[in-house]
Amino acid sequence: MEDSKLLNPRSLEHMPIQLFAIIMGLSGMAIMFAKGYHLLDIPYWIYATILLIDTVLFLVIFTFYMFKVLLYPHAVKKEFMHPIKSSFTAAISISFLLLSIAYYDFAPTLSILLWYIGTPLQLFFTLYIMNYWIHNELKVVHSNPAWFIPIVGNVLVPIIGVEAAPMYVSLFFFALGMFFWIILFTITLNRIVFHHPLAKKLIPTFFILIAPPAVGFVSYFRITSGSIDMFSVFLYSVALFTLILLLFMMKMYDIKEFFISWWAYTFPLAAITIATLMMEMTYHNTLTYLASMSLIILTTVVIIFVAFKTILACKAEKICIEED
């Protein structure tokens, strides 16, 4: 039998840190179906199956990346010092936090343990990346929506944090994420409007713009014990409008050539779907129900399609290769 490309030492050296975006997407999908089980009577086995697949893939990807850290520290350092890839380092801590959320109903003790691993990691990666931005001469063309990734991670902390730690911990991370979301959104919009278009492989990262307000809504909902007020509706409305705008610009997306960055479509879609399910939990009307079901279908189709293309790319040995 032909050896797997991933097991090839040279492939391990070129294993992209962006693979953790797969865990972000699948974890978001698991959380989405957990909410769907409670609110819309969606079968429980769907959530359980996705969570199992998500956990196995996380263990595989995390283990291989730790081997990369041990065997090819220079390659890891190159990623951590890259103006674009460095933002994906926070996908590691976000994976822990999202698995913590996904496991909360099923195994609360494991959930809290994952939270205590992911939270300090998230703070470290946020400090590291912001230090990198400040002390390096970056160009405007380096800025892109992927820069939101370490910021989104901070807003995830309160979702389990309200149960795992004193409230001021959750408020600290929520404030950090919301404040720098506004700053980075301004920087990113300036880059998109007034400078060269994003590279083809970065086009899917536009969907990351949905994540901060969508996750912010969910986080605020948890901090306030289920409050739907003017601020939470503001966050949800921004996330919803961003989704509508991105769908309006459908012609911009090219599905002919696969990039691992396609996984950027997945978690933000899951985030706005979860936020909509929480609106349904509060209002229980026809509009929120139809919106929830529509977004569940859209998110599921997108994730299945991206997963299928990823499997094809793995078989074609196009994932763990040296980039130009």
Image: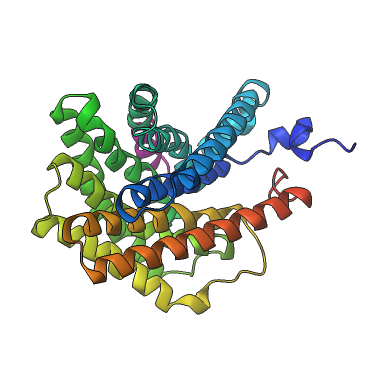
Rendered view: 187 above or below 6: below
Q: Position of residue 130 (x, y in %)?
A: 35, 39
Q: Give the image's coloring scheme.
A: rainbow
Rendered view: 170 above or below 244: above
Rendered view: 90 above or below 143: above
Q: Is residue 213 magenta?
A: no
* Boundaries of the magenta span: 125-137
- Image quadrant where one finds the N terminus: top right
Using the image as rendered, state which of residue 59 and residue 109 is in the foreground. 109
- Residue 296 falls left or right of residue 287: right
Using the image as rendered, state which of residue 94 and residue 143 is in the foreground. 94
Q: Main secondary structure of the magenta part?
A: helix
Q: Position of residue 145 (x, y in %)?
A: 41, 56
Tell me which residue sits at (55%, 34%) in the image.
Answer: 58
- The reply to whether residue 83 is in sight is no
Q: Position of residue 111 (x, y in %)?
A: 36, 27
Tell me which residue sits at (19%, 42%) in the image.
Answer: 222
Q: Position of residue 277 (x, y in %)?
A: 29, 56
Q: How many marks?
A: 0
- Residue 182 falls left or right of residue 42: left
- The reply to whether residue 132 is in sight is yes
Give the farthest residue toward the right: 1
Using the image as rendered, state which of residue 80 and residue 53 is in the foreground. 53
Asked where in the image residue 256 lies, by quadrant, the reply is: bottom right
